[in-house]
Image (cartoon, helix red, strand yellow):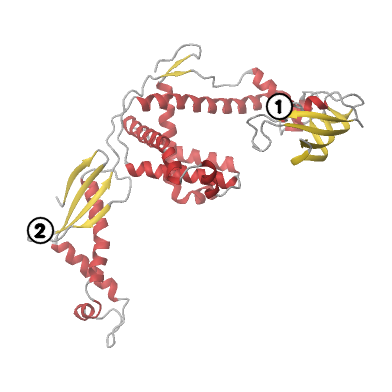
């Protein structure tokens, strides 16, 4: 045995790796042969400089360092395999000072995946969620498709909800115009949910050529803080009123809005797509419910390096979100009144939850013997190809070093699917035990 193991805690061990004199000598010989090809010494051809002269000219440090760089990773990998470890990060290594009668030794502090025996993941009670679309869902979708395909027809009457009108408007608060409050020739659907309260209601009843002032109230939680909670007056001129003329729901409509030939085919296609969406959403909700309960039922030691890595990811995501909003990170910190460390600490609980969930799902997959088959990988590549409209070859090329993450994602999905299938589904009207 060329290495010994000392457990520091459930997520960290210390390896002491011995390197025999014969191994070290052989590694130094190989290192010298590699280095000597790159040096020039007067009187000698490249690669033909005797070792003694090389060492007198350049010293032995370079040979020793190169030998260790080549030898230690191999010895470390052998020690990891010998002790059946699952490292989760690069080790911290150092040479142990030489001692009489002792071989050259290296100490490695290794963060490892903790041993987990997952409990309570079978037969978990979760709230039943419908996994297929209803007839009403299909009808609403077809109605929306008719609205999208509708023809706008001018009408000689007062504006009503659902009409599309062309207006000019100029908004002001306390007599002062505000940014984004003015438009000319704006085509607007009279849908109250799309505008601040009072705006659409004030337009309803107006006729072409009419002008009037309309009062509208910005909600207290409005996205623009300068407008939130304030009352505005909009000077509105209405130019015309149009109503939607919906096409008949028939075979011609199906041909118009799709590549299908009949309404029955269109209805079936809409049902299929809605079913996929409803099932996906249902599985997401049930998996969230399931994982929350299983995670709560298991105590898992968390490798600090994985938590810190997850924290890095969460903070980076936040920085990118802030940048997309057009705000610098420093300005965001100033506005929030927090330091970067305080922002980071605020994500710690979420980072720990994510790491715990990942480790637990991986342990369940291992216990259940769940793996990603070649067919699984091929199916996922086909799905990605269809999703992004790219040839499979380009998808594979884009993945490159992320193939491992693809495989991990497949295993995670299959594991959660099995847990859902093993769960006890309880109707939403019943109380689900925790």
Residue at (30, 40) in percent of width and height: 113
Element at badge 1? helix
State left or right for residue 342 relative to residue 139: left
Tell me the quarter of the picture where residue 197 sits: top right
Q: Position of residue 168 (x, y in %)?
A: 84, 37
Packing grade of label 1 (10 A; few <14, some 14-19, many >=20) is few
Q: Residue at x 27, y 62 (%)?
A: 69
Camera-near label (1 vs 2) is 1
Decide which of 209, 153 is in the foreground and name it: 209
Task: Please state, as top left, top right, bottom left or bottom right, where the C terminus lies in the image.
Answer: top left
**Extreme top residue here?**
430
Q: Is residue 51 visible?
A: yes
Circle 2 residues within 10 Å: few <14, some 14–19, many ≥20: few
Image label count: 2
Q: Nearer the viewer, residue 169 or 355?
A: 169
Decide which of 247, 230 is in the foreground and name it: 230
Q: Which residue is mark 1?
A: 193
Horizontally, residue 102 falls left or right of residue 379, namely left
Image position, residue 66 (x, y; %): 27, 66
Q: For residue 363, what is the image quadrant? A: top left
Under tag 2, what secondary structure?
A: loop
| Front in this rendered view, residue 232 or 253 | 232
Q: Quadrant of residue 300?
A: top left
**Residue at 80% across, 40% down:** 183
Q: Which residue is mark 2?
A: 102
User: Gap between marks 1 and 2, in whole Å?
Assistant: 79 Å
């Amino acid at each position: 045995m060329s290495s010994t193991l000392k457990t520091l805690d459930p997520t960290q061990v210390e390896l002491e790796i011995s390197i025999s004199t014969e191994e070290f000598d052989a590694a130094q010989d190989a290192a010298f042969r590699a280095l000597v090809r790159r040096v020039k010494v007067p009187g000698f051809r490249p690669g033909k400089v005797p070792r003694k002269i090389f060492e007198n000219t350049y010293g032995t440090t370079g040979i020793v360092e190169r030998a260790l760089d080549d030898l230690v990773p191999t010895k470390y990998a052998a020690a990891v395999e010998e002790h059946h470890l699952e490292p989760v990060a690069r080790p911290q290594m150092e040479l142990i000072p030489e001692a009489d009668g002792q071989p050259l030794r290296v100490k490695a502090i290794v963060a490892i995946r903790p041993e987990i025996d997952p409990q309570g993941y079978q037969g978990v009670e979760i709230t039943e969620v419908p996994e297929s679309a209803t007839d009403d869902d299909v009808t609403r979708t077809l109605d929306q498709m008719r609205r999208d395909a509708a023809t706008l027809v001018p009408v000689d009457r007062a504006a009503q909800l659902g009409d599309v009108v062309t207006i000019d408007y100029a908004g002001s608060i306390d007599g002062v115009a505000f940014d984004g409050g003015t438009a000319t020739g704006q085509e607007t659907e009279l849908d109250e949910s799309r505008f601040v309260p009072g705006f659409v209601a004030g337009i309803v009843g107006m006729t072409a050529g009419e002008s009037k002032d309309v009062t509208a109230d910005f909600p207290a939680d409005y996205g623009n803080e300068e407008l939130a909670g304030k009352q505005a007056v909009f000077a509105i001129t209405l130019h015309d009123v149009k109503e939607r003329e919906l096409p008949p729901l028939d075979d011609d409509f199906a041909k118009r809005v799709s590549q299908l030939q009949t309404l029955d085919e269109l209805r079936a296609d809409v049902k299929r797509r809605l079913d996929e969406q409803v099932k996906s959403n249902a599985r997401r909700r049930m998996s969230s419910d399931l994982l929350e309960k299983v995670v709560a039922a298991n105590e898992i030691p968390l490798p600090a390096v994985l938590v810190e890595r997850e924290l890095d990811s969460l903070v980076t995501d936040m920085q990118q979100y802030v940048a997309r909003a057009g705000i610098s990170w420093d300005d965001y910190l100033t506005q929030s009144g927090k330091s970067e460390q305080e922002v980071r600490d605020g994500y710690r609980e979420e980072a720990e939850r994510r790491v715990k969930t990942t480790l637990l799902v991986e342990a369940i997959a291992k216990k259940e013997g769940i793996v990603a088959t070649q067919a699984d990988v091929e199916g996922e590549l086909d799905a990605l190809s269809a999703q992004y409209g790219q040839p499979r070859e380009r998808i594979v090329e884009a993945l490159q070093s992320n193939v491992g993450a693809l495989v991990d994602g497949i295993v995670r999905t299959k594991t959660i699917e099995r847990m859902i299938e093993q769960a006890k589904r309880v109707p939403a009207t019943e109380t689900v035990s925790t």
